[in-house]
Amino acid sequence: MILGFLLAWRFHGWRSPLRRVVEALVIVAWIIPSSVVAFLWVAFLDGESGTLNQVTGLHVEWLVTHPLLSIIVYNTWRGTAFSMLLFGAALNNVPPSHLETSRIAGASQWQQLRDVILPSIRGHILTNMLLISLWTFNDFGPYLITAGGPNFKTEVLPIYVYRNAFSSGALGLGAAISTIMLAINLVLALGYLQLLRERKPKLEAA
């Protein structure tokens, strides 16, 4: 989320063909199906002929020696793309008059960000936090890259449910874990709704 916001803030107001290219790449990174993305990341991190090793000159089996780090980087990359798109739209909706008024009052760029930008896009921040939290919590994408291995080091909860319910035949255990996951998702969603309700009266008062 932070990386996505920093990129959106960096490109906000920047009129250049390069910005369009970057935005197009970000959109492509987000809309490509997970199965295709997983294949690309396997090829990127392959220990023998992977792109990363070819560029860096290293000979590291990333998915074997650093499997969890590889999954974290993969998830951060996809989440950054979504966050950048969302925050880019949010920043475009901030009234220019508010920024101009703060500049005239002598506010620095950091003060504009803290006192004008962030309060104006608070709803988008909450929405982004909820969505990326739910997607990460329920993401089955790592299975397509590592299948939960090696030695279950990347076995996130969705993969754990799949292994127990379908591979091991423990449907009851899989259903119980899924129910707990659903309850956690519900708590996150209710917490978001509560924060949103607290925000609405402030906006109406303003």
Image (cartoon, rainbow, N blue to C red):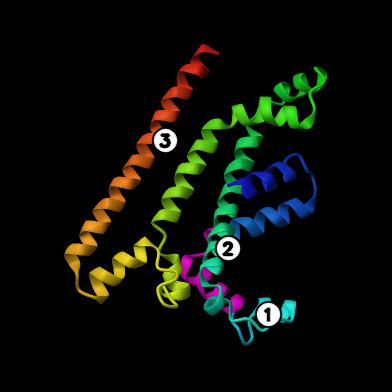
Query: Which image quarter: residue 22?
Result: bottom right
Residue at position x 24%, y 72% in the image: 166
Point out the tag, 3 or 2, that comes first from the N-terminus.
2
Q: Nearer the viewer, residue 7 or 32?
A: 7
In this view, the residue farthest toward the top is: 205
Instruction: Say if 31 sits above or below 59 in the image.
Output: above
Location of residue 191 in the rendering, given as x and y in whole percent from the top left corner: 39, 35
Disc number for residue 159:
none
Residue at 67%, 53% in the rendered image: 23
State which quadrant residue 168 falls in: bottom left
| Mark 1 surroundings within 10 Å by alpha-carbon count, few (fewer than 14), some (14 through 19), many (20 or more) | some
- Percent x, y of residue 103: 80, 23
| Picture layout, residue 51 above or below residue 17 | below
Q: Which residue is mark 3?
A: 192
Residue 154, horizontal then vertical, whole percent: 44, 69
Residue at image mark 2: 73
Residue 71 percent across, percent down from the top left: 52, 66
Q: Quadrant of the C terminus?
A: top right
Q: Which residue is mark 1?
A: 53
Residue type indicated by callout 3 = Tyr
Q: Amino acid at mark 1?
A: Asn
Q: Rounded to the nearest whole Å, what is the CA distance between mark 1 and mark 2?
A: 16 Å
SS assignment at label 3: helix
Q: Is residue 36 magenta?
A: yes
Cα–Cα span, label 3 and label 2: 26 Å
Q: Secondary structure at mark 2?
A: helix
Which region of the structure is painted magenta?
29-45
Circle 3 residues within 10 Å: few <14, some 14–19, many ≥20: some
Q: Is residue 95 left or right of residue 29?
A: right
Front residue (pair 40, 162): 162
Of marks 1 and 2, which one's residue comes earlier in the chain? 1
